[in-house]
Amino acid sequence: MIEFNARWDRYRHTVRPQSCIGENVSDHCFADRIATLIPLTAEEHAAIARLEDRERPVRRNGMVVRENERLSEMFVLKRGLMMSYMILDDGSRQILRFHFPGDLMGLTGLAFAKSQETIMALTESVVCPFERGHVSELVAKHPRIGMALMAFDQISRVGLTDRLAAVGRTSAKARVAALLLELRTRSSTGDGSFALGVTQEEIGDATGLTAVHVNRMLRQLEEENLIARDNGRITVVNDQRLMRTAKYVDRQGRIDLGWMPPAA
Amino acid sequence: MIEFNARWDRYRHTVRPQSCIGENVSDHCFADRIATLIPLTAEEHAAIARLEDRERPVRRNGMVVRENERLSEMFVLKRGLMMSYMILDDGSRQILRFHFPGDLMGLTGLAFAKSQETIMALTESVVCPFERGHVSELVAKHPRIGMALMAFDQISRVGLTDRLAAVGRTSAKARVAALLLELRTRSSTGDGSFALGVTQEEIGDATGLTAVHVNRMLRQLEEENLIARDNGRITVVNDQRLMRTAKYVDRQGRIDLGWMPPAA
DNA sequence: CGAGAGTTTGATAGTACTCAAATTCAGTGG
DNA sequence: CCACTGAATTTGAGTACTATCAAACTCTCG
């Protein structure tokens, strides 16, 4: 639950500069990301990279898209951490997804004139906006890229279904543990320790819990020696047990676009 | 929660024959569905319709795809009612989506070699299987169709996020009400009364509740005169109030693919 | 130092779950 | 045709998990 617009303009100290997709400091987050899934010709790579031509900085808590706002743009997240969420009529908030560099944001705009969700920056970020018409041109010219985009989007869809299953069918502790693992994996800091980057209230809004209960679950995970905490920084102490309590399923390792026909 | 494979081979009386997409009895559910979103040339329509060339009947409780099963096919649902779900390690089940005629099923197969979900028939159904390679050929030949598919998929994605928000942030009563409205709208029986077609346990597995509690919520909705029930048949008595208690948001009315470039 | 956000803790309330059993219903077999 | 069966629904009693409310505490920023 948040109060509308009540506190979205404070400054936060946890500005976590992130290199684009892990240690890869290329200028073309998204194109590189796709390239890790299927081989791209130089021409294809360049065509995708053109989606990232324009850059727009976003301040912490800045909104790139507001729910119900007319919008014909979509975005590549180039740097930072963002999220998309919906606000229900009683003011409660459901966070749908956290966005990391190389993610595509706002794709639902392909089917709706107005945005069905709000996209907000959790840290100082940089996004690359592009017109949806740009996508159809891209696909018209490179149908193979169209397939890649479609497949890529399915990966994030599975992230959604995993969250749904967690919220619908697992305990509070499991949900918090799962979110920690998600954040760790995706922020790709490599090993055990990572900066949380989100408040406990945000964890609650993503997992369907109250901030208070999230706090208690974190404490419990700490007391059980699954994690250690130090001022917003999380260290995973016992990987295996944390994954078990989270009912973690590794989807990343299952991704396979190998069936796609090679470039002409 | 279900017991694995425990009861998937009984017969049920509620076989509800459904015409393909409402009263439209065309042979090409899916193509017609896309055609309601954007104008298609005859050639494009025919190309899409070819996805529906093969037909396969599915018995009630028959599985078209099993979680973790190797699979390179995807499906158009031509007749009947189906669902996709995930089973968690404790045996609990999360229903992700109900499928109605004209829906595309198993699209996550574009990004994974093995299915990440199970797709099962709730009533006698007919599906049209097609190879994923067929899609990339289709898109290669008709990139505009590729865009339409992508946009179409975003609609069902929004359905997922709505369910997530409901499960994460609304009361049991609201979730059940919302599911009733979803089933009514999508089964397109037109007016107030419709056959539920799903058990209370299934409603629970879709909304993150137990069957017992679903039963109590249905009773409450009945006592408050929002719905009437008669042996699995639901009549919506008070539309407005039901929508309000469900925190219902109409997305269908917001769909807009008008921005897409016209056929060449 | 003061202010505001965020976190932490305690006490209490309430929603939804669990367990158990009764009931209804349609299909099955005698 | 009727008792039998298994699924599905319904109801009750008791429990547990999570929310709510309130207040103290911590930390950074101004």
Image (cartoon, coloured by chain):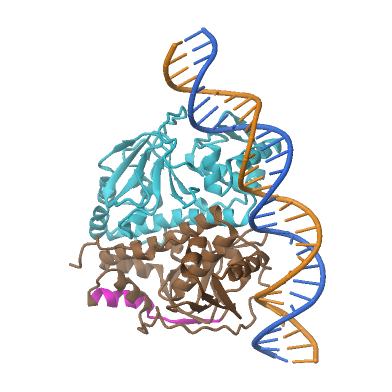
Chain colours: A brown, B cyan, C orange, D blue
Q: Nearer the viewer, residue A135 or A223?
A: A223
Residue A118 visible at all: no
Question: Which residue corresponds to the image point at 55% horizontal and 61% vertical from the top-left?
Answer: A175
Front one among A126 and A196: A196
Horizontal arrangement in the rendering, residue B40 relative to residue A165 (left or right) = left
Q: Position of residue A121 (x, y in %)?
A: 54, 76
Count of picture labels = 0
| Residue A158 lies in quadrant | bottom left
Give left or right: position of B76 versus B193: left
Image spot of residue A206 (x, y percent): 56, 64
Residue B215, quarter of the rendered image: top right
As drawn, the residue found furthest toward the left would be: A264
Q: Which residue is drawn at the image coordinates 30% and 72% (left, top)?
A: A36
Q: Could you say where residue A69 lies in the image, as x and y percent from the top left?
A: 55, 66
Q: Locate the C terminus of chain A and report the quarter of the image it occupies.
A: bottom left
Start-end of magenta stretch: A43-59
Asked whether residue B68 is drawn in magenta, I would say no
In the image, B162: left or right of A154? Answer: right
| Identity of the residue drawn at 32% across and 35% down | B57
Q: Is residue A12 above or below residue A177?
A: below
Q: Quadrant of the N terminus of chain A?
A: bottom right
Task: Provide residue B263's location: percent of width, then percent of height.
Answer: 30, 58
Residue B247 visible here = yes
Against A76, is B94 above or below? above
Most foreground residue, D30 or A62 = D30
